[in-house]
Amino acid sequence: MDRRSVTVKRETKETRIDLSLEMESRTLSISTGLPFFDHMLNAMAFHGKFGLIVQADGDLEVDPHHLVEDTGIVLGQALREIIGTYGPVSRFGHGIIPMDEALSEATIDASGRAFLVFKAEFPQEYSGNFHMPLLNEFFTALAHAGGLTLHLDCRYGSNSHHMAEALFKALGKAIETSFTPEQKGEVLSTKGIL
């Protein structure tokens, strides 16, 4: 099979994001100006075994919110475009990852129906300079732009960094499984259409 890849660009008055997603690649190059966020995206793609190139610039002097949310939008658009361009995928994916004292879980239905359930009680409000509530903005944008039903659960932990990193790794594994090409080329729905 040829390498499935898409490139998505988004430019607003607040952000400029260039993103390339390559499902059968391991190329990683992520630069958002937010080191913790870069680390999370890198962990997600590495453990999901897909290539991800992100160059994002934004009005960080105002607030990282716009950049984090818009990165979620662009990644979601890229995942949706993978299906639109290359055809049906396995649809369902799941990952559960421990990281020291933390355990996090991600479950995906690449159904075209956007829905997010995100459960996380981070004990520390910041990891480095990154405000942890921004993760909700990223996941909300990802689910809606990608047409994903996304359930994310930081089951427990005492270190916010560990909890979030386990979650991003679990999300990567779930993406890997759910975006595996459907071998028979059929849409996996009893309706015959998503």
Image (cartoon, helix red, strand yellow):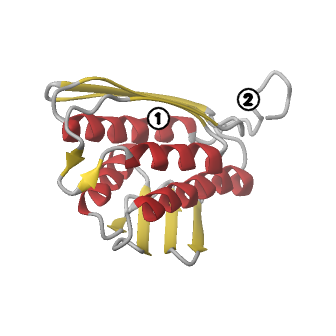
At which x and y percent is residue 139?
A: 49, 44
Which residue is pictured at 30% across the width and 49% down the height? 43
Which residue is pictured at 62% across the width and 42% down the height? 181
Earlier sequence position, callout 2 versus callout 1: 1
Quadrant position of residue 99: top left
Which residue is pictured at 58% across the width and 52% down the height? 76
Please state if 42 lies on the left or on the right of 119 as rendered.
left
At which x and y percent is residue 85?
A: 72, 57
159 relative to 69, above or below: above
Q: Is residue 1 visible?
A: no
Give the secondary structure at mark 2: loop
Please state if 29 lies on the left or on the right of 10 as rendered.
left
At which x and y percent is residue 20?
A: 51, 67
189 relative to 78, above or below: above
Q: Nearer the viewer, residue 157 or 167?
A: 157
Q: Which mark is on residue 188?
A: 2
At which x and y percent is residue 116?
A: 56, 33
Which residue is pictured at 22% across the width and 47% down the height? 126
Reading the image, the residue beneath label 1 is 174
Give the secondary structure at mark 1: helix
Q: CA distance from mark 2 to mark 1?
A: 17 Å
Q: Which mark is on residue 14?
A: none
Quadrant position of residue 182: top right
